[in-house]
Image (spheres, rainbow, N blue to C red):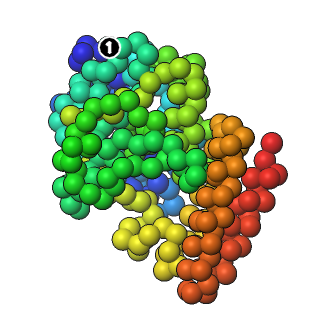
Amino acid sequence: MSLKKASVIIVNYNTSGQVIACIESLKGEHLQNIVVVDNASPNDNPDSIKAAFTDVVLIKHTENVGFGDGCNIGINWVLDHTDSEYLLFLNPDTVIVPSLVNKLLVPFSSPDVGIAVPRISMMNDKSKLWYGGGYMSWFKGSARVPGYGMNANAPLALEGRDVEFASGCAFMIRRSVLADCGGFDSRYFMYEEDVELSLRVLSAGYRIRYVPEAIVYHIAQGSQGKDVQSIDMFSGENPRLPFFVYYAARNRFFTVFTHGRFLQKFLFLIGFIAWFGRGGLNWIKYRRLDAFKALYRGLKDFAASP
């Protein structure tokens, strides 16, 4: 399997130190190219990545286009400049366990497998699961990951199986699937774009395979700063609450109303009202009027979107 050609894409935004650690962990992997897309980081020195690894392809974009379009820039470079059969995507705040690439390539022996996803554990406590397979919850309007935060070696986390959701944190996709389905939806900017891509790949008839033998460690919310890493993103205590509320609300509506059937849309609307009720009480408690304004803007922008 190692003879198959694979390239890796990493999007950087103020995380060059983490990117360097991520690339360091890739030593020994069978990779054709390592492509880093810098999203116009304002408080970073992306050139330090190139200084540390001269063979890395560093693409310095002139504006922050978000995670999805940052990945798309990397995708276009790989498709235009290489013959890589597989593209591996890694968040900058990840490190891999050796032989990740070879292990992710195994399920692609089945021609209908379009994406392979590793087991992801939390960097600060590797015994805790961050991703061990996921499914689409239409009630939530997003993906759910069974066992999140629990034992990373629980039976379900160790079970290789077909899943409905591939986390954008770390996954491998066939080049031909990207040619067939396209890359990330440019509307999303941040969050939920991996849910939408997963649904699109499944709708095209491909399978998503969870590979527990392939392991990645993840910090989570690495580009958001230490002040939000230990706080629930929708909590009134979160200093960046409006940012999360805006993109979660808008993008979940994008996903459900793009891919959902009538009953799934109806179920989502019920779930959204319940989510808003719980969140709204918390935001009132912490006097977060900015969260309500962000929610309004998110719904307004969804409604105005073509």
Which residue is pictured at 28% across the width and 32% down the height? Answer: 160
Q: Position of residue 127 (x, y in %)?
A: 18, 55
Q: Let me know if residue 67 appears in the view.
A: no
Rendering coords of residue 218 (x, y %): 30, 52
Residue drawn at 56 percent across, 54 percent down: 140
Q: Is residue 146 left or right of residue 265?
A: left
The quarter of the image holding the N terminus is top left
Query: How far from the left and from the top, in percent, is residue 65?
Result: 60, 48
At 58% across and 52% down in the image, what residue appears? 139
- For the C terminus, the quadrant is top right
- What is the number of callouts on the image? 1
Q: Residue at x 66, y 39 (%)?
A: 260
Name the quadrant containing residue 113. top left
Q: Is residue 229 visible?
A: yes
Depth check, front residue: 34 or 125: 125
Q: Is residue 22 above or below residue 112?
A: below
- Is the residue marked by circle 1 packed among few (<14), some (14-19), or many (20+) residues within 10 Å? few
Q: Quadrant of residue 44?
A: bottom left
Q: Is residue 191 above or below residue 272?
A: above
Please give the residue where the numbered disc 1 appears in the rendered image. 109
User: Quick check: 241 left or right of 289?
Assistant: left
Label 1 sits on a secondary structure element that is: helix
- Percent x, y for residue 212? 25, 36
- Which quarter of the picture shows residue 169? top left
Q: Is residue 95 left or right of residue 79?
A: left
Q: Where 75 falls versus 58 (above or below)?
A: above
Three-letter amino acid code of the residue under disc 1: Ser
